């Protein structure tokens, strides 16, 4: 019989790639015939100061979440519980509910939450690892790195400190999933047991390959400081790039970026189109010449990259974090030093002026997708992880 799977996930107010992965995993498991259940929470319920105060305490250890998970385990009798995001409403208490019921736990690490209060290793416009490896991540608490609030960061710091000292990550999780080898190495530096971490990338359903050379450059992602959008606009302005640019997404920098496009006179080339459904995003990818991925933080993966690969679209990406494990310079795209506007401008112009080379790298990107990032490939890897933890518990 195929394993029964209980998924646990805390959705953010503004949903992104992590939430899309949960939906894709659930759909894949159901398609393959697994009895699959989802217990979810959403941050939209944190809508007033009183709720924030309660969550700050519960983020360390939520007894109500533990009881809720225990009840769900009793109801659906899963063979494995797969946790995607427990922060802040579920909390690490969910592991205790699983342990008490004798159900093995798999935890996907979508970011660096277990090593950094703001989960990004990014502060003040640069990479920051000041909390890496510390039992108590006090630098982040002092600076208020989470939501620019010392009070809220203190809650995250308490959660990290308590559970590191308690041994939660070491003893109550049977297997962790990291998305790249780079991410795994950072988490091992943070104190997670290397023998419990398996590298398994995300996946996307096959949308089919694009046709034609494409007539614009495309960015798809969150509009936030760590994504490097300012560098892209610098490249367009300083080098007077006459290349159409479409920016898809939403986030805290949306208004600021719109103002800058107008202020710098980029309105004829740069267009902010807002957030779009996945079908529209894929259609745009099939009409673009290349995807831009300009991140300045230690990216754990980059879902839009493999979406582009699936469409046969090459990617110009930052040489940072786990990205070089996905984008191969000269084959599936181009790698550029993060934060270097001149280098970005030169590379973008070179790619734009060579549509045949874009097409070649696009074909290689499509081949890379078929080899590594299809649902079928991912399912094989996921089942190996599930079977490993289930058999270990039985023995």
Image (cartoon, helix red, strand yellow):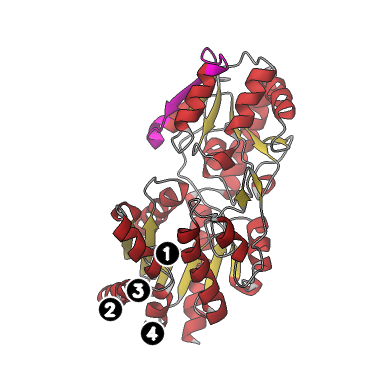
The residue under the point 49% across, 73% down is: 387
The local secondary structure at tag 1 comes to loop
The local secondary structure at tag 2 comes to helix
User: Is residue 107 positioned above or below 247 on the image?
Assistant: below
Mark 1, Cα crowd under 10 Å, few <14 / some 14-19 / many 20+, is many
Determine if residue 296 is in view. Answer: yes
User: Is residue 129 positioned above or below 262 on the image?
Assistant: below
Mark 3, Cα crowd under 10 Å, few <14 / some 14-19 / many 20+, is many
User: In the image, 176: left or right of 48?
Assistant: right
Q: Nearer the viewer, mark 2 or mark 4?
A: 4
Lower sequence index among marks 2 and 4: 2
Q: In the image, which residues are magenta?
A: 263-280
The residue beneath circle 3 is 78
Structural distance between the alpha carbons of marks 2 and 4: 11 Å
Lower sequence index among marks 2 and 1: 2
The residue under the point 39% across, 45% down is: 14
Give the image location of residue 255, x and y in percent.
Answer: 45, 29
Give the image location of residue 103, x and y in percent.
Answer: 40, 79
Structural distance between the alpha carbons of marks 3 and 2: 8 Å
């Amino acid at each position: 019989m195929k394993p029964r799977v209980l998924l646990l996930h805390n959705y953010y107010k503004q949903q992104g790639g992590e939430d899309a992965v949960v939906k894709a995993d659930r759909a894949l498991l159901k398609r393959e015939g697994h009895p699959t259940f989802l217990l979810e929470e959403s941050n939209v319920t944190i809508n007033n100061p009183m709720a924030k105060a309660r969550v700050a305490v519960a983020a360390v250890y939520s007894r109500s979440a533990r009881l809720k998970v225990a009840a769900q385990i009793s109801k659906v009798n899963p063979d494995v519980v797969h946790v995607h995001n427990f922060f802040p409403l579920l909390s690490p208490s969910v592991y205790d509910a699983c342990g008490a019921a004798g159900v093995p736990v798999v935890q996907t690490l979508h970011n660096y939450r277990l090593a950094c209060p703001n989960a990004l290793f990014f502060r003040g416009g640069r990479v920051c690892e000041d909390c890496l490896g510390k039992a108590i991540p006090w630098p982040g608490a002092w600076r208020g790195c989470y939501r620019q609030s010392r009070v809220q960061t203190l809650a995250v710091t308490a959660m990290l400190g308590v559970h590191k000292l308690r041994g939660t990550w070491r003893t109550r999780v049977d297997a962790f999933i990291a998305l790249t080898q780079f991410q795994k190495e950072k988490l091992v530096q943070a104190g997670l047991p290397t023998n419990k971490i398996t590298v398994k990338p995300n996946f996307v359903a096959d949308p089919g390959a694009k046709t034609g050379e494409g007539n614009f450059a495309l960015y798809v992602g969150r509009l936030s400081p760590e994504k490097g959008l300012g560098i892209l606009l610098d490249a367009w302005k300083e080098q007077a790039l006459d290349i159409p640019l479409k920016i898809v997404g939403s986030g805290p920098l949306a208004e600021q970026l719109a103002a800058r496009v107008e202020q710098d006179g980029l309105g004829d080339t740069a267009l902010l189109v807002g957030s779009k459904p996945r079908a529209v995003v894929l259609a745009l990818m099939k009409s673009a010449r290349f995807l831009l991925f300009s991140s300045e933080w230690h990216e754990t993966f980059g879902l839009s990259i493999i979406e582009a690969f699936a469409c046969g679209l090459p990617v110009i990406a930052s040489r940072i974090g786990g990205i070089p494990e996905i984008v191969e310079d000269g084959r599936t795209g181009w790698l550029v030093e993060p934060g270097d506007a001149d280098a970005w401008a030169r590379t973008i112009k070179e790619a734009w002026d060579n549509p045949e080379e874009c097409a070649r790298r696009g074909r290689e990107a499509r081949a890379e997708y078929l080899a590594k990032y299809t649902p079928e490939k991912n399912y094989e890897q996921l089942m190996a992880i599930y079977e490993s933890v289930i058999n270990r518990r039985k023995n």
